[in-house]
Amino acid sequence: MDKNYIIFDFDGTLADTLELAFDIYNGIAQEYGCNPARKEDRELLKTRKPQEVLMSYGITRLKLFSLLLRIRKELATHIPDVNPAKDIIPALRDIKNAGFSMGILTSNSARNVSMFLKVNNLSDTFDFIYSGKNYFGKAMVIRRLLDHEKISPESVIYVGDETRDVEASRKAGIRVIAVRWGLSPMEALAATHPDQIAETPKELLPCVRRIYEDNIPGKPW
């Protein structure tokens, strides 16, 4: 039987990087001719499309590319200060101990993610880190990951915190668990109809099991 994989989004799902990314952005926004992000504006990301929010800050597509590169570079110097999502570490170990293989898909740099895992003693928890840019949509990145790691769509569940994670997983033909502790609010997540919604990290393993129960005859737990 093929291995059963759980692939995690990084920013917002595993690591609480949003506030730090905003702080870094505000420190460099003026250099790029962009408007700073006010604290009250940050909630807009939970109710509006990212493109709309970016436009309100004066961030064009061209500026976005440069800004992301700069933010990732700055983020690398702050990795020791990035907190894991609350209660995610024991939840990850529960999934690993249950016999599942785990990976990370991120638009962040693999180096940043590796440093985060090392700082939090999680390096041996994940089988791979795949860093991919979303120029042609996240579904394309997911397909490339599956091809690179030789994983069949039937053998994988994606875990993410945004509505686009659910939508991309659907397009890529894989199952998906949406989590409540990240960027998108519950109402928006539910509207995209993920296979499961995890309210807390503790619910991840039960969600994984419910998805696999009716589809995989040889259970790894």
Image (tube, rainbow, N blue to C red):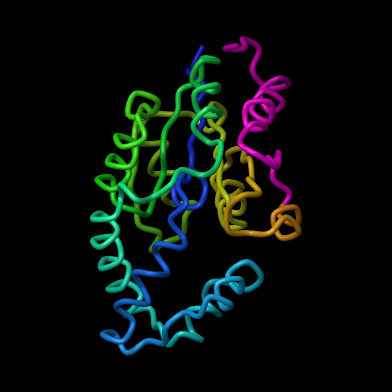
Location of residue 203 by image quarter: top right
- Which residue is the extreme one toward the front? 81
Residue 161 position within the rendered picture, expressed as x and y whole percent measured from the top left: 58, 51
Please name the residue shown 38% across and 28% down the image.
126
34 lies above or below 123: below
Instruction: Let me know if residue 165 is in the magenta part.
Output: no
Q: Position of residue 135 (x, y in %)?
A: 38, 63
The residue stretch that appears in magenta: 193-221
Q: Is 138 placed above or below 147 here?
A: below
Residue 201 belongs to magenta span: yes
- Measuring from the top left, give residue 91's x and y in whole percent: 56, 29
- The residue depicted at 45 percent of the width and 23 percent of the height is 101
Q: Quadrant of the C terminus?
A: top right
Q: Would residue 172 be found to the left or right of residue 17 on screen?
A: right
Q: Estimate the x, y position of residue 95 in percent, counting from the top left.
A: 54, 23
* Nearer to the camera, 46 or 214: 46
Residue 46 visible at all: yes
Closest to the observer, 28 or 65: 28
